[in-house]
Image (cartoon, rainbow, N blue to C red):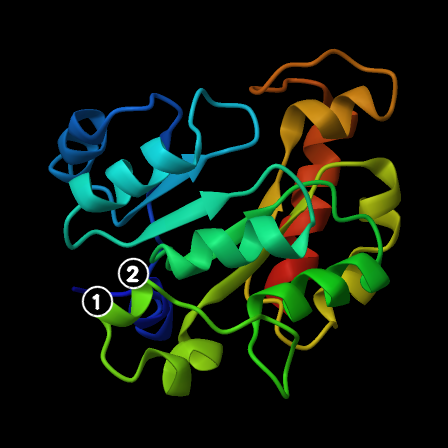
């Protein structure tokens, strides 16, 4: 299995598919469609914990991220224990929230993740020894407050990447809840987020 970190280390881009349908077969279809990784959406999709595990099975060798519903340690830990390659966390607006999220993802001494990788350890012998270096912590930037705090969020040790939440970013500024924006002000914020992230 080629990991997300390996693609990044080689200078490549990761094409990530989104799994909102609670079906192992849909995950299997997406895994065969050429995506580099997939994300099970526990925040806004129709997925629950059982269907998430089924999608992890269905995806086979394709790395699977999980978007948790909120920045809460039990939700993050259960996703990782089930074998997620990383976690996407919504509504991270400050460096303090980003640091808390990273702490949920990492085992001590780098964080506070509780030990119990019931499925992850089956997939990766010696999982605990390498998890901190391999598992991805990806906060979402999706409010005006998060954009203001972007440099501080990116400076938090252990933040591996960020995801932009386009509709919530627009909503937080009184705009429409759309995914594909043509508003020059929002597009300029996207460009600022990308440039700042690449700089970090």
Q: Residue at x 72, y 48 (%)?
A: 192
Q: Are marks 2 and 1 in contact (CB under 8 Å)?
A: yes
The x and y percentages for residue 25 are: 16, 27
Location of the C terminus (image quadrant): bottom right
Seen in the image, is 121 located left or right of residue 72? left
**Residue bearing the label numbered 1:** 123
Locate residue 6: give its quadrant.
bottom left
Of 41 and 159, which appears nearest the observer?
41
Q: Residue at x 58, y 46 (%)?
A: 163
Locate residue 10: give its quadrant.
bottom left
Is residue 112 something one can see in this rendering? yes
The x and y percentages for residue 169 are: 75, 30
Q: Residue at x 49, y 74 (%)?
A: 115
**Secondary structure of residue under mark 1:** helix
**Residue bearing the label numbered 2:** 119
Toward the left, the furthest residue is: 32
Relative to 91, does residue 171 appear above or below in the rendering? Answer: above
Of 106 and 139, which appears nearest the observer?
106
């Amino acid at each position: 299995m080629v990991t997300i970190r390996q693609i990044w280390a080689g200078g490549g881009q990761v094409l990530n598919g989104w799994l909102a349908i609670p079906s192992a077969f849909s995950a299997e279809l997406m895994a065969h469609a050429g995506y580099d990784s997939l994300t099970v959406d526990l925040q806004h999709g129709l997925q629950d914990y059982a269907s998430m595990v089924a999608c992890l099975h269905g995806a086979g060798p394709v790395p699977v991220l999980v978007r948790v519903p909120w920045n809460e340690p039990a939700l993050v830990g259960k996703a990782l224990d089930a074998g997620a390659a990383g976690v996407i966390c919504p509504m991270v607006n400050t460096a303090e929230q980003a640091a808390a999220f990273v702490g949920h993802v990492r085992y001590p001494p780098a964080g506070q993740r509780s030990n119990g990788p019931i499925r992850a350890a089956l997939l990766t012998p010696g999982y605990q020894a390498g998890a901190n270096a391999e598992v991805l912590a990806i906060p979402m930037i999706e409010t005006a407050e998060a954009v203001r705090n972007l440099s501080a969020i990116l400076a938090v040790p252990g933040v591996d990447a960020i995801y932009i939440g386009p509709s919530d970013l627009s909503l937080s500024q009184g705009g429409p809840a759309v995914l594909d924006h043509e508003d020059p002000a929002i597009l300029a914020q996207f460009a600022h987020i990308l440039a700042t992230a690449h700089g970090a």
